[in-house]
Amino acid sequence: MKLSKITIYPVKMPLVSHFETSFGRIYDRECVLVRIESEGLVGWGECAADRDPGYSYETTGTVMHILKDFVLPLLVGQDVVDAADFQKRISGIRGHHLAKAGVEMAIWDLLGKRTGQSLLQMFGATRGKVDVGVSVGLQDTTADLVRVVDGYITNGYRRIKIKIKPGRDVSEAEAVRKAYPDIRLQVDANSAYSLENAHILRPLDDLNLLLIEQPLFEDDIWDHRLFQKQLRTPICLDESVISPRHARYAIEMEACRIINIKPGRVGGLSQALEIHSMCQQAGLPVWCGGMLETGIGRASNLAIASLPGFSLPGDISASDRYYTRDVTFERFKLNADSTIDVPTGPGLGVTVDEAAVREFAFGEETVS
Ligand code: OSB
Ligand code: MG
């Protein structure tokens, strides 16, 4: 596949409602969209970095820089065969997984369009729909949180994740658990604790949670092992697992019992597939995390979540949970059984609304 022209767009999309985590509140979501032209076809991808380095060190700005100055010049004019070939070509560029993953996604989209296969088919997945839940941000008060959760349950979500941070942890989880004694509930701390203060979270063990996501520092797999020994509830790693190697460390150290796979965070769909296989072999359940993706990234998440090891509901909500206007013509809807259908068209299976992309874009760089 000869890649002739690559354009990257930093976009800023207004969220339906603000989203607050232990690292801050946002009203708009930034990301970088990747458009690759190859032999008469166009492929799209999404780099899930945000404006600020809160979740990851990568930002919209670093993604634009790394892609424009380092990644794209290695690809334009080249005959890129597949995702493995792409990874080999960029192997000299350290880190910057969110940036690389968006380009790999566009390559998968092109490969699928070329062969008439959906991502689902290319992955050898069989499930046509996947179990999903909703990730609920911190609210101003506990009462507000219960009201917001109530709204999502009314919409049909049967698995709820709430964000926690010091001072707003056990109280919030207890309130939601009291209001919904049977709902599938989990919490996400986004690295807000250290081993010294993690004992605050011990009462969570009595709330019948599916998992506790990323309580400790992102670069501290070992301390997660020590904390997991103190808990009955499974720890699930998100930020700590940035590559298949890190997944192996986490598994061998018994630092967690569940892994949240985000193709962006681990450097691309090919890396996510590798982690999925490793976890299947080790008997670890996985699920697909989300990064408030546009319709482009959401299509990719649905495809990978249809693999058999993804046995827990993903953070892949319907389009109307995030954006009034999206960059794809397709909008994802929640089915009555708290699932979303996986796209079946070639590649990602979505059609990009290029006028919407240009409207949300606050810059543009082309390498050809
Ligand atoms: O930690 O899972 C996370 C969103 C942005 C960055 C990090 C996270 C999240 C979410 C949202 O929890 C999940 C979604 O896309 O619905
Ligand atoms: Mg998380």
Image (cartoon, helix red, strand yellow):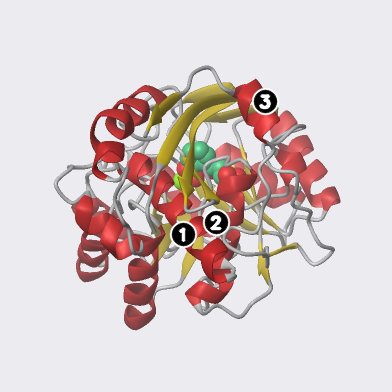
- Badge 2 amino acid: Ser
Which residue appears at 34% of the width and 67% of the height? 275
Q: Is residue 98 left or right of residue 203?
A: left
Q: Nearer the viewer, residue 259 or 175?
A: 259
Question: What kind of element bears circle 1?
Answer: helix
Question: What kind of element bears circle 2?
Answer: helix
Which residue appears at 84% of the width and 63% of the height? 336
Q: Provide the residue designation for mark 2.
A: 300
Image quarter of residue 190: top left
Rendered-image quadrant of the N terminus:
bottom left
Distance from Cα at disc 3 to Cα at disc 1: 43 Å
Q: Which mark is residue 141?
A: 3
- Is mark 2 in CB contact (under 8 Å) with mark 1? yes
Which residue appears at 18% of the width and 51% of the height? 91
Question: What kind of element bears circle 3?
Answer: loop
- Disc on the earlier residue, 3 or 1: 1
Q: Nearer the viewer, residue 48 or 36?
A: 36
Foreground: disc 2 or disc 1: 1
Is residue 188 something one can see in this rendering? no
- Disc on the earlier residue, 2 or 3: 3
Q: Position of residue 32 (x, y in %)?
A: 47, 32
